[in-house]
Image: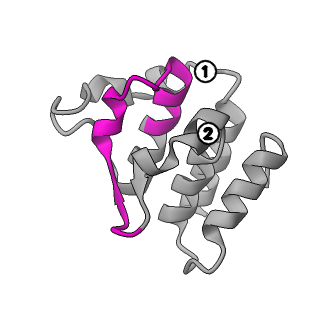
Amino acid sequence: MLFNGEEHEKFYNDLIEGFTPDPYYYSLFYLLSLTEDTRKNFHKIYNIAERKVRPQCLRDPWQTGTTIAITRLALNLFNGFTGLNGEFDDVRNYTADNIFCRKDLMKYFFQAIAIRFE
């Protein structure tokens, strides 16, 4: 599996430890482990106790262009989220040309897709 450094790998492995193998959760956890910002704000994106994503996090001030792209793909792979008809985000932001415009992240995005659909 491809990781963006030791922190990415450790955070991901810590999240999946003891978790029932599930490609939906594993792809979510993989992406949300990708950067320091998504790791630091993981609980603002996903509530482990309730096993729920928080799409409203897309409006949080800590979000950057990079973390928004990561969060959008993570939510979409997890449950098909596409902005809830504009309530939290514009559905057009979930098209491939908007999510995959980050060439530096593309290999990790494809790894997350492989995790989800293998």
| Observer-nearest of 19 and 84 | 19
Q: Amino acid at mark 1?
A: Arg
| Contact? badges 2 and 1 (CB < 8 Å) | yes
Earlier sequence position, callout 2 versus callout 1:
1
Q: Residue tagged by mark 1?
A: 102
- Please give the name of the residue rendered at 56% of the width and 46% of the height, measured from the top-left corner: 32
Q: Quadrant of the N terminus?
A: bottom right
Q: Decide: is 28 above or below 71.
A: below
Q: How is the image coloured?
A: one colour
**Residue 109 at what x, y percent from top left?**
61, 39
**Magenta stretch bounds:** 49-71
Q: CA distance from mark 2 to mark 1?
A: 9 Å
Q: Secondary structure at mark 2?
A: helix
Seen at 19% across and 39% down, the residue is: 84
Q: Report the number of discs.
A: 2
For the point 51% across and 41% down, which residue is it?
41
The residue carrying mark 2 is: 109
Residue 50, image x, y percentages? 33, 68
Q: Which mark is residue 114?
A: none
Mark 1 Cα-neighbour bin, 10 Å: few <14, some 14–19, many ≥20: some
Please indicate whether residue 40 sits to the left or right of residue 43 in the image: right
Residue 45 at x, y percent in the picture: 42, 46
Magenta stretch encompasses residue 116: no
Q: Is residue 42 left or right of residue 89?
A: right
Tell me the quarter of the image containing the C terminus: bottom right
Element under label 1?
A: loop
Residue 44 position, x and y percent, is 41, 45
Q: Is residue 110 above or below residue 67?
A: below
Q: Please tell me whether residue 65 belongs to the stretch shown in magenta.
A: yes
Task: Assess disc 2: are there few (<14), some (14-19) or many (≥20) residues with their C-alpha within 10 Å of its C-alpha.
Answer: many
As drawn, is 117 to the left or to the right of 8? left
Under mark 2, the amino acid is Phe
